[in-house]
Image (spheres, rainbow, N blue to C red):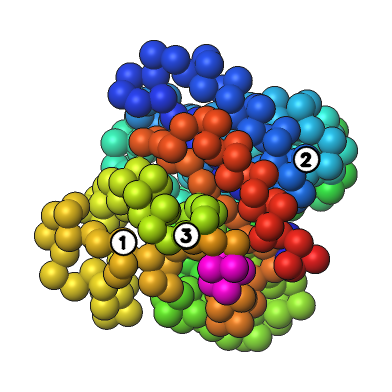
Amino acid sequence: MKFGVLIRPQDPPNAANIVGRWQQVLEAASVAEDAGFDGVFLPEHHMMADGYPPAPVVGCAAIAARTERVDVGTTISLLPFYNPVQVAEQSALVDVISGGRMRMGVGLGNFEPEFELYGLDKRDQVARFEEAIDLVLRAWSGEELDHEGRHFRAKGAISPRPVGAELWLGGMSDPGVERAARFGLRWATDPLHNLQVMKHWADRYRQAGEAEGTSDKLKIALLRDGWVADSLDEVERTWWPCIRSEHWFYFKQVRRWVAEMEPFLQGVTEESDFRFENHRIDRLIVGSPDDCIHEINRFHEAIGMDYLIMTFRVAAGPGHEEELACLRRFGKDVIPAFR
C-alpha cells in the first residue's frame, strides 16, 4: 500500500499569513518525503477567506521542485471550471518537471457560488465534467484533437506530453464511482463517510468495472482524516476540537451524506452533537500507532484500497510543528507495518 498526505494551505480567518503558511506547506512536503510517504496532495476551493488554494496545480509544481521521489497531485481539482486542454497542458508540464510524478485527481464541484464565479450553470456540471475527462485523456495521449462538443472545442495537439501522469476521479455517490469505473480510472474517495459507505461504493465501483470491462484498471485511493499520538485520550484532547468543526461544516453544507448507513449521524443537530467516541468509529484513523494500524487494516479488508491519503492538519490546527511531528511519527511507527 502507498501512503500520501493531503496538505491544507489555509490561514484562518483572513489569510493574513498565507505567505508563511505556504512555506510551512513546502516544508511539510519535504518532511513527508523524508518520513517515507509516497505522495503529497493539495485540494481546491474558491473564494475562501482563509486562502484555501484555488489553483492547486501551481502548488504541485512548487512541491515537485522541493521533492525528488513522492507523487505530487490534487485531491480534488474541480475540472468543470476549466478548459480541459489547458488542464492537460498545465498538468503535463508539472508531470515533466517532476519526472512523471503528477497525479491529477479531479471532481465535479459542489458549491453553487464557485460555479457562479466562473460564469457557469451548475446544472451543466456532469456534462462538462465527462466531456473534459475525455479531452484531458485524449490530449495527454498525444492525439491530434479535432473536437466539437457540447461545451468545448479543440483542434491540435499539446506539447510536451506527460511522461507518467495519472488521472484520478473523485466521487461520493453511486453515479460518481460508476463514472470512474466507466472511464477505467482510479477512484479517489471523500474523507468523510464511514467504512460501511466506503464499502458500498467500492462494491459499486468494482461491479461497474466488471460491466464496463475495465476491472483490470480499477484502483482506490482512500482519503482519511487522522492523527497519531500516545493514546485516544490525547487525540481527543489535542486534535479532535480542530477536526470536529471541519466535519460539522461539511455535514451542514454537503447534502449527499448516506444517512441510512451513518448511524452515528442520526439526531445530530449542532456541532456539539459530534462526539469523538462515536464519530471516530469506522471513520477516523486515530490513536496510538497500533490503533492506526488496526483501523487501516479494517479499511483495507473492507474496500481493498492500494493508496491511503491522510490529512493530519486542518484549518483550525493543530499547529505546524505538531503536524511535522505527526508526519514523522506516522512514517516511523505506522507506515512500516504495510511495507
Specify the amino acid type for callout 3: Ser
- Decide whether residue 129 is among the magenta residues: no
* Horizontal arrangement in the rendering, residue 289 relative to residue 127 (left or right): right
**Residue 143 seen in render:** no
Residue 99 percent across, percent down from the top left: 87, 38
| Dots 3, 2 in contact, CB < 8 A | no
- Residue wearing tag 1: 276
> Which is more N-terminal, label 2 or label 3?
2
Measuring 52% from the left and 15% from the top, which residue is drawn there?
Answer: 19
Q: CA distance from mark 1 to mark 2?
A: 31 Å
Write down the quadrant of residue 206 in the picture: bottom right
* Viewport quadrant of the C terminus: bottom right
- Residue wearing tag 2: 34
- Residue wearing tag 3: 231
> Which is more N-terminal, label 2 or label 1?
2
Q: CA distance from mark 3 to mark 2?
A: 25 Å
As helix, strand or loop, the secondary structure at mark 2 comes to helix
* Horizontal arrangement in the rendering, residue 274 relative to residue 110 (left or right): left
Badge 3, how many Cα within 10 Å: few under 14, some, many 20+? some
